[in-house]
Image (cartoon, rainbow, N blue to C red):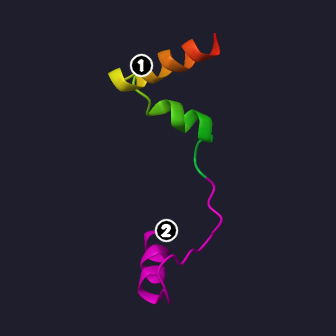
Amino acid sequence: MLELGLRVLAGAASFGTRVDFDLEWPVPLREAYRAWQPAEPSPIVRKLIEARRGSNA
């Protein structure tokens, strides 16, 4: 994957060049997302969650 990125960077004709390729992630996206989340939200995230819950009540 790194090699492909370097080849694209070296040969890109212009800014914003995009290359799509098939890559199967080793774990399901939802599982991967939850794995890096801290057990307790940061203070700003906690406030945002509280504000969202308050507006949905």
Q: Quadrant of residue 31?
A: top right
Q: Amino acid at mark 2?
A: Met
Q: Position of residue 16 (x, y in %)?
A: 51, 76
Q: Position of residue 11 (x, y in %)?
A: 47, 89
Vertically, is 13 above or below 57?
below
* Bounds of the magenta segment: 1-24
Q: Nearer the viewer, residue 1 or 18?
A: 18
> On the picture, is 36 further left or further right than 25?
left
Quadrant containing the C terminus in the rendered view: top right
Residue at 58% x, 47% y: name it.
Answer: 26
Farthest-out residue, top? 57
State how far apart marks 2 and 1 are (Cα).
36 Å
* Residue type indicated by callout 1: Arg
Left or right: 9 as drawn, with respect to 53: left
Secondary structure at badge 2 equals loop
Q: Nearer the viewer, mark 2 or mark 1?
A: 1
**Which residue does the image show at 49% across and 68% down from the upper left?**
1
- Report the residue at 42% width, 19% height from top: 46
Residue under label 2: 1
Give residue 46's mark. 1
Would residue 20 appear left or right of 10 to someone viewing this image? right
The answer to which of 25 and 55 lies nearer the viewer is 55
